[in-house]
Image: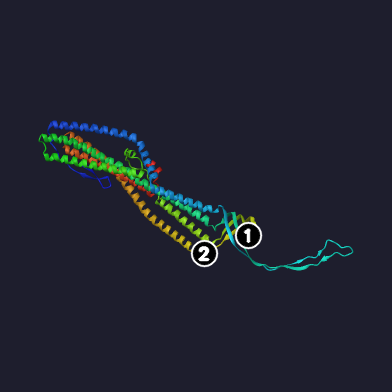
Amino acid sequence: MWICMPNRAGMPSVIKRTKYKPLFNNSPSELYKNQILKMNKAIILVGLLLVSVAISAQNHGATANDELVMLVEAALAHNKQLKNQRLELEKTDITKHQVYNTYLPRIEATGTYSYSKGKLNMDTEPIPFTTPPITLPIQIPNMPPLTMPSMQLAIPGIDKSFDYNGNLWMGGLMAKWTLFTGLKVPYLGKALKHKIKAGEYMIEQSEANIIEDLTSYYDKIALLAQAQKVLAESEKRLGREAKVAQRALNEGLITQHDYQKIEIARLDLSSRQIELRGNEKLLQLKLYQLTGLPMDSIINIRVKMKPLKGINNQSSYLERPEIKALDEAIIASEYKLKSETSGYLPKVQAFATHSYAGFKNGETGPLTFNELSAYPINAVGVGFKWELFDGFHTHEERKKAKIQIQQTQNKRADAAELLMLNYNKAINDYQVTSAQEALRAKQQDVSKRSLLISYKEYQNGIIKVSEFLEAQTDYEKAVFDYYQTVYNQRQSAVRLLNATGELKLERLRELY
């Protein structure tokens, strides 16, 4: 018989074949009748099982798509790396707003207080001046008016130091408004815009990778269920054979050695079932780690295995988000180069001030005063700054920007080559597995017809029971091989969608 043997990844992939020798001759009529009765019961049970599977498929077929969508949405919301990518995108968007906020006016309020004490030195030249003629307003009778002639006088110069002290107060408002940055702000803003677009494409690719990883484990659950089904049917068959063999042993039709072979096979089968249950638990834990959903929701997942059809090869690997992200990164680097080149241009800024300055409660030499102040002091103007030589800073920054462009272009070329190979491999795998799926389906039909023929021959006594069991085992192997091929075909379809940038949640809804 054929027994599924799980590989290291937890998936049944190796089939071990063990032939059982006939346990007894078909000549005793009583034993033959018992065998026929048991086979009829088995057929009835199989029929009931098929009916129950059909009903279950009708009940769960409509929800299988919803289950996968639920898992994908939970995984995309739960993935920490994806969250960090989104947060990094938010930081870049904030930086872009900060760049454009350069054009917003800045308003500053300033104020200072200080106590000042020192010497006030005064050294002035004499100040000459001329007095005009002055006619006395009082006239003396019988005399002409008296007029004082003009005189050349001078205020003597001062060369003296005065001690002073007092409280100095200053305060005001200042508004600054950047009018022109040498085109640095527009170019930097466009560079950040394309950088954000590149980040969005990378997030899209990360989501596709998460979906591909999730669907792999999702389909493994279905494949593992098929393996468990094969082992369960083998267990039932061995159980029936063990009962028949026990009676044959009691009647002396078989030896103890032949009977022990069945017991060893049953124990080996139980060991395989334990291993499969452990692998199923690991798969459930992996889905829990990917999605963060409660284990109760994951345990109840039932996957319906069917080939994924309707995938065309018209799309190109150039539509993959990595290529688009690198294209956006190249454009961003080019705008960064333009922003560095604009460093040679002048910067223009408008400003306005409204301030106060006062000296209170002070002394200057023999003079004492309560306040010396100037208010309001208003000023409005425009200023510019033009760095004619910045120590080659702008020149070197332009060199760095050019190198960045070359690096990004090299990454894009390298990624295109690798993605082209990946795309061709994905197409080949999908075509091969789709063809194999059709062949495995035919093989399953042939095995089923062979099983029906063997059953009729067994009923007519043409073949031995061991040969009928071998035909039934071949059919079970063909069924499992078919589902293994379906799993491979489904995964190749998912990889092809990822290779062309089409692996999105909306596309899964159409296929699954």
Q: Which mark is residue 363?
A: 1
- Give the numbered dot on residue 390: 2
**Amino acid carrying mark 1 in the image:** Glu
Locate the N terminus and report the quarter of the image it occupies: top left
Q: Is residue 130 left or right of residue 479?
A: right
Q: Is residue 344 above or below residue 278?
A: below
Residues at marks 1 and 2, CA–CA distance in whole angstroms: 48 Å
- The three-letter amino acid code for the residue at tag 2 is Asp
> Could you tell whether 383 is left or right of 44 in the image?
right
* Between 180 and 262, the one nearer to me in the picture: 180
Residue 296 location in percent, x, y? 33, 38
Query: What secondary structure is marked by label 2?
Result: loop
- Residue 194 to residue 445: above or below: below
Query: Considering only order in the chain, which callout, 2 or 1, is on the residue closer to the N terminus?
Result: 1
Q: Nearer the viewer, residue 250 or 104?
A: 104
- The location of residue 322, given as percent across then percent down, is 41, 52
Residue 385 % position (x, y): 56, 61
Label 1 secondary element = strand
Residue at 36% over, 54% down: 421
Q: Quadrant of residue 63?
A: top left
